[in-house]
Image (cartoon, helix red, strand yellow):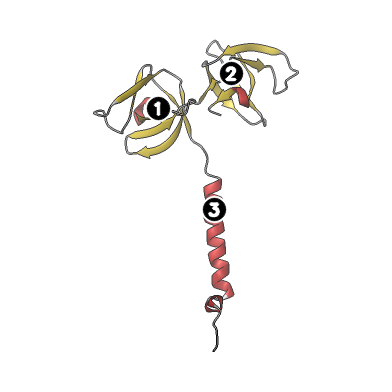
Amino acid sequence: MCRRNPFNLWSKGKISILLASVSLFISSYVIAQIEYFSIAENAVVMYDAPSLKADKLFVASLHLPVEAVVNVEDWVKVRDSSGNLAWVEKKALSQQRYVVVTVALADIHESADINSALVFQAEENTALEWLDSNTTGWVKVRHTDGQTGYVKVNQVWGS
């Protein structure tokens, strides 16, 4: 009795193409970037479904950073720093990014160095404008009063 190896049915070229396709799919999935927005208006209603007739969950304030989870036509399902999920009208979102302080008191430094001068401190739940995060472990931010500096990434959410 002759046994056939099922892999003999595939040429090496077909297997290489299959592996390359799977690799490309996985790498494109892995490098998918998290998309952050902020609430563009004051007192935006957050819903449990993508409809104005859905149940109202809570009201979000201006500059609250949110992570987009799902986009459906004129609605976006978002997650906030507490992990809450809700639907919001797309028109109520801004591409201007903000982060929110997640520790009791965040230290904002003059440069991305723990030994640099302290510019200011921000209390928990304070929204700070996200300017960039080019330095590993740090986020450059601006307070509403105009002060800028660097905060450790583990003291904020939304970066």
Is disc 1 surrounded by few (<14), some (14 to 19) or many (20+) residues within 10 Å? many
Q: Which comes before the other along the chain, label 3 or label 1? A: 3
In terms of secondary structure, where does tag 2 sit? loop
* In-image side of 38 versus 102 (left or right): left
Identify the residue under disc 3. Answer: 26
**In the image, what residue type sits under mark 2?**
Val
Q: CA distance from mark 2 to mark 1?
A: 25 Å
The residue under the point 68% across, 17% down is 109
Residue 10 point in image, percent of width and height: 53, 75
Residue 93's mark? 1
Q: Disc 3 versus disc 1: distance between alpha carbons?
A: 30 Å
Q: Is residue 35 above or below residue 140?
A: below
> Residue type at mark 1?
Leu
The C terminus: image quadrant: top right
Please, is residue 114 above or below residue 70 in the view? above
Residue drawn at point x = 55 percent, y = 15 percent:
124
Q: Earlier in the sequence, mark 3 or mark 2?
A: 3
**Disc 3 to disc 2, C-alpha distance:** 35 Å
Q: Amino acid at mark 3?
A: Ile
| Horizontal and vertical percent position of residue 23 | 56, 57
Labelled disc at residue 103: 2
